[in-house]
Structure formats: structure tokens, C-alpha cells
Image (cartoon, helix red, strand yellow):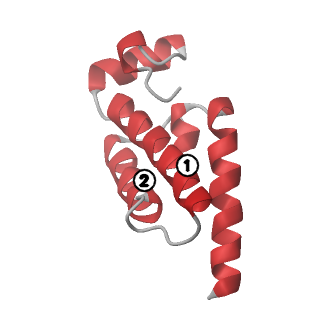
């Protein structure tokens, strides 16, 4: 169990630091051709694994998980809305009013 938590801790830190370089699709582990169903499924999977109440470990691990959770939530918020997704797909940028964690 400890080895699994160490691996998970390293993964969370890596993902939190890489967040600024990722597209919204990459935050969810998807490609830009993902369907609405795939987007929702990826959000659910990430939310379960990264939710701050579910992550065990040091305060640093929890803080990294919280940052990553917020980044994934932002990606889902944009990609699950058809109009925002269209705008993101055409410009490659998060709309200004949705740029919380980016």
C-alpha cells in the first residue's frame, strides 16, 4: 500500500506541475476528438481519484491533488458546454470568464 501511495504522490505532483502546459483535453486524458460521453466519463474517473477528500497523505499531497482537481474541473466545465467547447476548439484558449486555474 505504501509503494502505491508513493507512486500516486509522485503522479499527483507531476500532474499538478504539468497543468500549465496541457490542453483541456490532456487534463482529462483525452484527445480533441472525444465525444461528450467520453468527456463526462473521464471527468468522473479523474474526480474520484483526485478529490481532496479522497486523497490520503501529507498536506503537500492533498494540496497538489486539490490543484489538479481544480484544473480537471475547469477542463470539464469548458468541454461539457457545447458553446464553450466550440470556442475552445476554434481558438485553443479558455474563455476569459472561465480562466480560473489556467
- Residue placed at 52% from the left, 16% from the top? 93
Quadrant of the image containing the N terminus: bottom right
Tell me whether the residue at label 1 lies in contact with that at label 2, contact meaning CB atoms closer than 8 angstroms: yes
Camera-nearest residue between 35 and 101:
101
Q: Label for residue 100?
A: none
User: In which image quadrant can residue 3 be found?
Assistant: bottom right
- Residue placed at 33% from the left, 49% from the top? 40
User: In which image quadrant can residue 7 be found?
Assistant: bottom right
> On screen, 43 above or below 82?
below
Camera-nearest residue between 16 and 35:
16
> On screen, 57 above or below 16?
below
Label 2's element? Answer: helix
Whether residue 65 is visible to the viewer of this picture, yes or no, is yes
Image position, residue 32 (x, y; %):
52, 34
Write down the residue under mark 1: 29
Residue 54 falls left or right of residue 56: left
Write down the residue under mark 2: 42
- Residue placed at 43% from the left, 25% from the top? 100
User: In which image quadrant can residue 61 be found?
Assistant: bottom right
Amino acid at each position: 500500500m505504501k509503494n502505491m501511495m508513493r507512486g500516486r504522490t509522485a503522479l499527483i505532483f507531476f500532474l499538478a506541475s504539468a497543468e500549465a502546459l496541457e490542453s483541456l483535453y490532456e487534463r482529462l486524458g483525452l484527445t480533441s476528438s472525444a465525444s461528450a460521453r467520453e468527456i463526462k466519463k473521464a471527468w468522473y474517473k479523474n474526480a474520484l481519484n483526485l478529490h481532496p477528500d479522497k486523497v490520503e497523505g501529507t498536506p503537500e499531497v492533498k494540496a497538489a491533488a486539490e490543484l489538479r482537481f481544480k484544473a480537471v474541473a475547469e477542463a470539464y466545465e469548458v468541454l461539457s458546454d457545447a458553446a464553450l467547447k466550440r470556442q475552445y476548439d476554434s481558438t485553443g484558449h479558455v474563455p476569459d470568464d472561465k480562466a480560473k486555474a489556467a
